Image (spheres, helix red, strand yellow):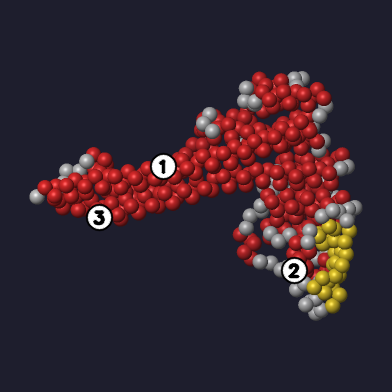
Amino acid sequence: MPLYAYKGVGSDGKALNGVKDAESPKALRQLLRKENVVVTSFDIKKGKTKALGAGKGVNRDVDFKDIFTRIKKTEIAAFTRQLATLLRSGIPLSESLTALFEQADNVKFKSVLQAVRMAVNEGSALGDALRKHGHVFSDLYCSMVKAGETAGNLDEVLTRLAEFMESGEKLKAKVQGAMIYPIIMIVIGTVIMGVLLVFVIPQVTQVFADQGMELPLHTRFLVGLADAVANFWWLMIALGVLAVWGFRVWSKSVEGKKTWHGFVLKLWIVGPLLRQVAISRFARTVGTMLHSGVPMLQTLDTSKEVLGNVVLEREVAIARLAVTEGESLATALAKSGKFPPTIIKMIAVGERAGTLEQMLLSVSDAYDSEVELKLDRFTGVLEPVMLVVMGGAVAFMIFSILTPLLDMQKNMGTF
């Protein structure tokens, strides 16, 4: 196994060097990455395997399964934090991009980083090079990088950007995690009901048919439902798929999206929760961009895209127009009636004190904590409710079957 001498940067920004056994340059970078070390250069000390370009060439250890993977936001966040660390350590931008390009595992992300590195080497600004890959780096990301380059504090801006992305992914994971249980319960419940309706109930009700019994209303309803599922399951699936497709098409149209997003905000429990998530994203985005030196109007243009709700986006667009006419942000948002009074007051205090960025970030932190608390309560209430619903459905089936069975036994006892 080859022995490599390497140079790198630790998570604290300090320069490191040492030697390490590894099967290949790729394996060396993976091993050191686990130790939170970003390799900037390496050379082979002993062994027959040649280090390709002493850390300056392209790693050709390609796993073809990576071609079918997508670029995750967590990978972009990790790249951002590592780039900030390298720049803070005094390593030039071009060399930093080369080091991060060489250690990237995702083939698609690697090709993007290669294009960015080449553009920077040809004299392009980093923000401009990133903007050419809008499918990977958002307008918010590119605007903040551009502001950092202009102000000369790119490493600080990248650090804030990494924290912003990590916070967003954490909240997203929390929301998705809260939805896993109900989705699993719905799937399991649907499968159980389907098996009972298609295989169990028809066999039991056949006994009643053979006896020529007059069944109660609830039992006839259950038998009819079982027959419909058994005979027309394919039609139900087709109608379900068609309904989902139709809803997706409608909800993506201009009027449909506006109607649906407005309806969602009015839903009991879910509406206020989604509103808080959207406002938290908006506050954190605006605070982070303003702190990075992005102008207010550009910040409002970009930040409204993270709300994920066209009703709120429209209100922010109206607020931006009011800000251009000289109004304060707090006054402009207050007119919409879509933002809580507490948020408006905190923004107003921040504007008067000149600490709007810090106030917005504090608002976002408070809302994130409140969202997590509400999600915990929501899932805590949802679990027993779903168990009661599923138990009630099973109990209805059992009751509908037992009622005629008891009548049959009673009639047999009279003879």
Cα distance, mark 2 to mark 1?
Answer: 52 Å
Label 3 Cα crowd, 10 Å radius (few <14 / some 14-19 / many 20+)? few
Residue 391 percent location from the top left of the image:
39, 45
Q: Nearer the viewer, residue 89 or 189?
A: 189
Figure check: 177 above or below 31: above
N-term mark: 2 or 1: 2
Q: Quadrant of residue 310?
A: top right
- The residue sitting at 49% across, 47% down in the picture is 183
Q: Amino acid at mark 3?
A: Gln
Local secondary structure at mark 1: helix
Local secondary structure at mark 2: helix
Residue 128 percent location from the top left of the image:
78, 45
N-term mark: 3 or 2: 2
Q: Which mark is residue 101?
A: none
Q: Can residue 318 be seen in the rendering of this structure?
A: no
Residue 136 percent location from the top left of the image:
69, 49
Q: Pointer 2: what residue?
A: 27
Label 2 Cα crowd, 10 Å radius (few <14 / some 14-19 / many 20+)? some
Q: Amino acid at mark 1?
A: Val
Residue 354 percent location from the top left of the image:
83, 27
- The residue sitting at 83% across, 64% down in the picture is 56
Q: Pointer 1: what residue?
A: 389
Q: Nearer the viewer, residue 252 or 186?
A: 186
Figure check: 367 above or below 53: above
Q: Which mark is residue 203?
A: 3
- The residue sitting at 62% across, 25% down in the picture is 338
